Amino acid sequence: MKVLLVTGGAGFIGSNFIRYLLEESGYAGKVVNLDKLTYAGNLENLAGIAERFPGRYAFVRADIADGEAVEAAILTHGVDAICHLAAESHVDRSIAAPDDFIQSNVVGTFCLLELARKHRERIRRFHHVSTDEVFGSLGPEGQFREDTPYHPNSPYSASKAASDHLVRAYHHTYGLPVTVSNCSNNYGPYQFPEKLIPLLIANALEGKPLPIYGDGKNVRDWLYVRDHARALWTILQKGRVGETYNIGGRCEKTNLEVLEALCAILDKRAPRPGGSYRELKTFVPDRPGHDRRYAMDCVKLEVELEWLPEESFESGLDKTVQWYLSNREWARRVQNGEYREWIRRQYPL
Ligand code: NAD
Ligand code: DAU
């Protein structure tokens, strides 16, 4: 792997992955970050990277569904591997307006696969980043395994399931050298404040209500984003072609437990005059079709590829809170839309 195309590299996980690749992994090649810069794409997540790694990082603004633009990027930069993260990622948005999810997650992935097939002599690996949500919802017991049947419940998870099936089919039919990973809920630096943890931090610091859907007892399995980046790099290096790997933190928490843990850290690190942050907790109407519980069995990744998370929920959450406290300017620019300035300058209407 000399030139790795990372799609969605300006998003939350993509930018953390690129930082990990260039700063920590030991990867000596070049990263080409191809991103459409939707509302979720923010090049400020990668501030300083191009300067610190001259010749080893390039940015291309393009839609993965734009075959000509992506093909030009592949040929210009001599791409020989793809790590595909670009997607519409927020479940609530998919419920309100599913269209973009079908276009980017399904059609966009199909377009990338077609290019990988066309240029199969040069593309040695296509890694597809997916989610545990494709498996549906669990009762109180059990965990998702790699061979658990798919049962997606939201437009988001259905679109990710469709893309997973296409990737698998391109391996089975055309012999494309693919790997797939399905990961649980990530948290950490640079996460857009629409997702639970950064939303709670942002609202708490502004003294706003902390919204909890339904009874707050839905369970998610939480993983610190750098551990996801480490897992992706491990799979790119050692994963067996045609295989799927579950990634998770073995860290099941109800949403109420997440809120409690966050408020305890915030109470310590940024005390709120007049009381605890938990007083801001507010129950709001439930998400339609809200999956009750996710839990991942990641034995395959742990045993076969010798990956283990390095961060516990306590240490990861503490680092996350500290990051948001030290980067309030980043959060402010995201919240008031200033982070879009660069795009407005580069691509005037
Ligand atoms: P994100 O919303 O923060 O970032 C998505 C990025 O993709 C953005 O930079 C956006 O501009 C880009 N993008 C969207 N549509 C595009 C298109 N058509 N062409 C090019 N770029 C496009 O998402 P994230 O949370 O970083 O998730 C990244 C990937 O990981 C997604 O595939 C998601 O399904 C998957 N995933 C996320 C989580 C999680 O907890 N966030 C967990 C498991 C898997
Ligand atoms: O499981 C992996 C998935 O995790 C990824 O594939 C998705 O891209 C990512 O967005 C995430 O999906 P969730 O729906 O689990 O994440 P979200 O942060 O939106 O919600 C986490 C839980 O918190 C969920 O049970 C809904 C609840 N919630 C969420 C928000 C935004 C609240 O109670 N209040 C809120 O305001």
Image: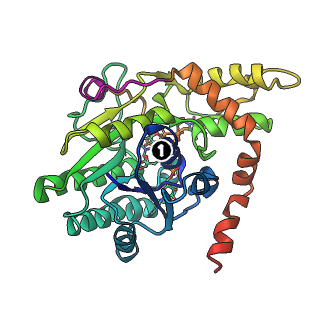
Q: Residues within 10 Å of mark 1 (few under 14, many from 20)?
A: many
- Helix, strand, or loop for circle 1? helix
Q: Is residue 57 left or right of residue 329?
A: left
Residue 37 locus on image (x, y percent): 55, 63
Residue 125 locus on image (x, y percent): 26, 52
Most extreme residue toward the right is: 273
User: Front-most of 120 and 344?
Assistant: 120
User: Front-most of 29 and 297?
Assistant: 29
Q: Is residue 3 left or right of residue 216?
A: left
* Quarter of the image where one finds residue 173: bottom left
Residue 58 shows up from this direction? yes
Whether residue 253 is situated above or below residue 86 in the rendered picture: above
Whether residue 118 is situated above or below residue 124 in the rendered picture: below
Q: Is mark 1 within 8 Å of ligand 1?
A: no
State the residue position of label 1.
Answer: 17
Residue 72 locus on image (x, y percent): 38, 74
Whether residue 345 is situated above or below residue 5 in the rendered picture: below
Residue 260 locus on image (x, y percent): 64, 21
* Quarter of the image where one finds residue 309: top left
Residue 132 shows up from this direction? no
User: Front-most of 122 and 207?
Assistant: 122
Residue at 18 percent of width and 56 percent of height? 176
Placement of the C terminus among the 4 image quadrants: bottom right
Q: Is residue 93 left or right of residue 321?
A: left
Q: Is residue 309 left or right of residue 317?
A: left
Is 284 covered by the magenta stretch?
no
User: Front-most of 57 and 289?
Assistant: 57
Callout 1, which amino acid?
A: Phe
Most extreme residue toward the bottom is: 349
* Range drawn in magenta: 298-310
